Image (tube, rainbow, N blue to C red):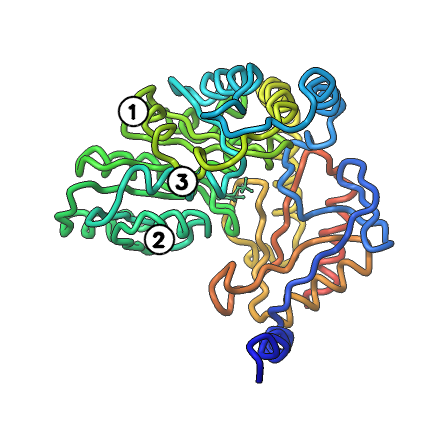
Amino acid sequence: MPIWDRLGADIAELDAAGLRRRRRTISERQGSEVLVDGRRAINFCANDYLSLADHPALTAAAIEGARHWGVGSGASHLVSGHFAEHEAAEKKLAALVGCEAALLFSTGYMANSGVMPALVGRGDAIFADRLNHASLVDGALLSRADLRRYPHADTAALERMLGESSAPRKLIVTDSVFSMDGDIAPLRQLFELAERFDTWLLIDDAHGFGILGPHGGGALRHFGIDSPRVLYIGTLGKAAGVSGAFVAGAHQVVEWILQKARTYIFTTGSPPLLAAAICAAADLVEASDDRRMHVAALIRQLRTGLRHPERLLASDTPIQPLIVGSNTAALALAAALFEEGLWVPAIRPPTVPQGSARLRISLSAAHRADQVDALVAAINRHSP
Ligand SMILES: *Cc1c(COP(=O)(O)O)cnc(C)c1O
């Protein structure tokens, strides 16, 4: 059998295991309401928690940015692809999250896979929460440091592992808000361990930026953490409604990342029009207390309305996972809800552990109370 023909059997195997992934195509969008695969539906899938992605002020900033700068940046940041809009966005973002400096990356995936190899290498050790995002796992592998994974949020286990390590440089790395579980890492205790064992602490705040902390300033502000050993990653395609990411920290470590991160150096600078939109997004995030309060009310509404609230994981964030168990049951429930115009993704392994397939309900400021009521009623009807 030629090498490409084996793929047919491999794909059939994915199908049989309920693991084949499929895309749905959106042809219209207005806030949480979409026309998707020809059906009107309420979108409970997106990470656009503050509903900024189609905000008129962001659209206007992007259009104005395109008028002023054109589209492409033309080169990498270190050659000639770095514009005044990028500088302005970095300053705004650093101030918002409470750090000295920030550096823009094209995506969060690239930030994570570039920052970790810049900090540690062969012979060093990385201590990672078992439920960390895939991009942090890939960053750890790229660094060639020894990767040690501790049980989810288990600071006692982490303490033992740190005590046993004689690696010259150590890095603790964690999601702040876990992307498929919605819970928040024990960042205070992790920071104390980082101090005691003299390690770096890398915090991926992809789902906390814009949501946690005063004015959405994120996890560092939420926990009152401020230290040159901390690196903060914020992503801009979720609550901020744009695209891209940034790493923030003390001047010196950000300067080091700029010198060393291969995913910063060897890629074209992101379009300056996006940086213009990011500047507008930073202002909107800061001014969105009313949107954050509305989302918090929707979270309470969902958690108190379900007939089986124990099937929800413990989460105070807009990520509300409903555990179903088997892949086929999760797919069937998602399909039944979709038939009713309620679009909720079924999340299956390898994104989550075997046997914990779930519906990952994402709430956003665009949702109305009656839409959450409709979701609650449908889930109750389908779960005996
Ligand atoms: C989405 C996500 C990323 C990747 O960010 P992108 O900008 O989408 O590449 C990284 N970490 C976590 C925890 C995420 O949820």
Amino acid, disc 3:
Gly
Q: Residue 253: x and y, percent?
A: 31, 26
Amino acid, disc 1:
Ser
Instruction: State which tag comes first along the sequence, 2 or 1.
Output: 2
What mark, if any, has residue 146 been given in the picture? none
| Ligand 1 contact, mark 3 (Cβ < 8 Å) | no
Tell whether 97 sits left or right of 239.
left
Measured Cα–Cα span from mark 1 to mark 3: 21 Å
Which label sits in the foreground, 2 or 1?
2
- Position above or below: 300 against 240: below
Depth check: give the residue in front, 276 or 4: 4
Screen quadrant of the C terminus: bottom right
- Position above or below: 344 against 289: below
Measured Cα–Cα span from mark 2 to mark 1: 26 Å
Instruction: State which tag comes first along the sequence, 1 or 3.
Output: 3
Question: Which residue sits at x=20%, y=41%?
Answer: 169
Quadrant of res 170: top left
Residue pushed farthest bottom?
1
Amino acid, disc 2:
Leu
Question: Which residue sits at x=74%, y=51%?
Answer: 375
Q: Which residue is mark 3?
A: 114
Q: Residue 53: x and y, percent?
A: 69, 32
Q: Residue 325: x and y, percent?
A: 56, 68
Depth check: give the residue in front, 53 or 245: 245
Q: Which residue is mark 2?
A: 141
Q: Residue 28: x and y, percent?
A: 83, 42
User: Callout 2: helix, strand or loop?
Assistant: helix
Q: Which residue is mark 1?
A: 227
Measured Cα–Cα span from mark 2 to mark 3: 11 Å
Instruction: State which tag comes first along the sequence, 2 or 3.
Output: 3
